[in-house]
Image (spheres, rainbow, N blue to C red):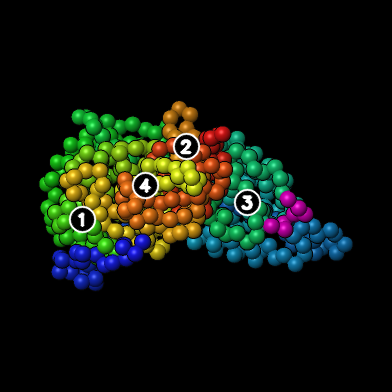
Amino acid sequence: MANHEHEGEFGCRCGCNRRSFLTASATATGALAMNWLSPFTQNAMALQDSPTPRKKAVVRAVFLYPPAKSFAEKPDAWWGWPGNEFDAAAHQKKYTLAIAKMEKELGMKIDVDDEPIADRTDAARLAKELQTDSPDGLLLIVFHDKSLAAADALLKVAAKADIPSVLYVGLGMSGGKVTGFSRPGVYFIQSMDNVEAVEAGMRMINAKKRMSQTRLLSIADTKTSREVTEPFFGITVQILPVDRYTELAAKMPLNDSARQFIGQVTRFAKKSRTINRQAMENAARAHSAVTQLLKDEKADGLAINCPRLGLFKPCLSFATLNSQLIPAACENDLAALCTQLLGQLLTGRPGFQHNPAVDTEKNLYYASHCTCPPNMHGPEGKQLPYVLRRYPHANEGSCAIQVFWKTRDPVTMAHYYPGKKPSLDVYSGRVVISHPSPPATGCATNVQVEITDRAEADMVKGHHNILFCGDFARRFRMFAQMHKLPLTDID
C-alpha cells in the first residue's frame, strides 16, 4: 500500500492558510456549515442540530433499592445481595452525573427521580405515573436483589403502554445469573459499573424517536415531486426530480466555499491519481448543490440516483456528509439510507454503503463502493488515509475517493429491510485488508472482511449493506429487540 502514502498533488490553491480556512468555513454551505479540521470532520452530531423541528426523546429514569436504614435497624437481618458494604446512594450519585452527561451529548431529556423505588408502594405510584405520562422510554437501574420483583412489575406496565425500556442490574446485585428479562421491548443489561451500556440503551430509545421526526430527500428519475412516509420508523421522504439537482449543480458558482472545499479535500489526501482541476471543481459544485437542496428542503439527509449524473456525481459530497453524520446514500437506495441513519444514531459513526462480493477461496467478504467516509471512527476519531481518484465506471473524469481501512479493526454490518414486514440483518466481522488499486478493480474503496459470526462469508445477504467500524452488532440486535423489529433469519 506504499503507493497511497504520498502527498496530494493539488494542495490548497485558494490562498487561505489553515487558520483563515477554519474561520471562513464557519459560514460555508449555509445552514450545514461545519467547524472543519478537514472537510470530513465535525465535532458535534449533525442530527442534533437538524433543520427539521424536533421534539426531544423523554426518558424516565429511576433507581431501585431498599433504604440502608431498613437493614441497619435489624442487626440480625439477612443483608442479601450486593452485600452490606455496597453504598447504593453513592452509586446513584455517580450514575446520575453520567446520565446528565449523556443527556446533553445525545440531545434528549432524561428525567431522573431523586428518590429510589424502595418498596411496592413506590413501584405502584410509578406504574400509575407511567400510564398517565407515557414517556418515550424507561430506564430502571437496580442496586439490590430485593428490587427485582418491582422492576419486573414496572416493565410489564411499560410493555402494556408500549414504552421501550432499559433494565440495568449491576453484576453481583443478585446471587447469580438474572433471568427472565430478555424479552421484546426491553434491553436487559447485567454488568459491572457499565455506564457505556446504559448510554447504548439511551441511544436505542433516542434513535427511534429521532427517526420518527426525520425528513429525507429521494432524488429520483421522476418529473413530479411527492411525499411519502416510511411506515416502521415514521420517516418522511420527499421525492424530487433528479433534474432539479443537475440544473442546480450546473449553476453553482465556484465561490470561496467551493475553493476551500477543494483545497481541504486535496490537502488531506495522501495522493491524487488521474484527477484534474476540472473534476475537483465539479465535485465542489456537486457538494454545493447537495447542501443547498438539504437547506432549501429543510432535510436531514438524502439519497440520489447518481451513477449517470455525468460530471456532477456527488461521491466526495456523500463521503463528506456521512463523515459529518449527515446520512447520504448512493443510487437512490432508501433502505441503505435508513440503515445509514439508524447506524449513525446508534453508534455515533458513519457507515460504508457498498456492493458485496465474496472471495470463495479465502472465505472473506469483499465490500466496495465510491463514497466511503474517511471518518469511519466518528467525527472526532482518527481519520483514515484516503486517495482521490477518477470515478471508475465512466470516462468523463469525475472524482471518487479510495479510503484505506485499518487491518484487524472490528466491524459491524447491517441492512434494514423496509416494507409491510420490516426486518433487520446484522453481522460481525474484522478487517483483513484494503487492497491498493490495482490489483483491486471496480469501485474506488474496497475492504476485505472476515465474517466472525457466520461459518461462511457467502451467508451474508443483501445488496448495499452498510459497514460500520466497531463492535456494535449486539447494539443493533438489542435495538431490534427493544423496538420489536424482527431480525432476518438467514438460515
Name the residue type under label 2.
Answer: Lys
Q: Classify residue 197 as left or right of residue 37.
A: right
Q: Classify residue 292 as left or right of residue 211.
A: left
Name the residue type under label 4.
Answer: Ser
Q: CA distance from mark 2 to mark 1?
A: 35 Å
Q: Position of residue 343 (x, y in %)?
A: 44, 47
Q: Position of residue 243 (x, y in %)?
A: 18, 36
Q: Is residue 175 one of those drawn in magenta?
A: yes
Q: Which mark is residue 434?
A: none
Q: Which mark is residue 189?
A: 3
Q: Quadrant of residue 45?
A: bottom left
Q: Main secondary structure of the magenta part?
A: loop
Name the residue type under label 3.
Answer: Ile
Q: CA distance from mark 1 to mark 3?
A: 52 Å
Q: Nearer the viewer, mark 2 or mark 3?
A: 2
Work out whether mark 4 precedes mark 3 in sequence or the reverse, and give the earlier one.
3
- Residue at (20%, 56%) from the top-left corner? 274
Residue 347 can be seen, yes or no: no
Q: Is residue 87 one of those drawn in magenta?
A: no
- Residue at (39%, 33%) from the top-left corner? 230
- Report which residue position mark 2 lands on: 461
Q: CA distance from mark 2 to mark 3?
A: 29 Å
Work out whether mark 2 precedes mark 3 in sequence or the reverse, and give the earlier one.
3
Q: Nearer the viewer, residue 315 or 101?
A: 315
Work out whether mark 1 precedes mark 4 in sequence or the reverse, and give the earlier one.
1
- Report which residue position mark 1 lands on: 274
Q: Secondary structure at mark 2?
A: loop
Q: Secondary structure at mark 4?
A: strand
- Report which residue position mark 4 lands on: 368
Q: Position of residue 149 (x, y in %)?
A: 72, 46
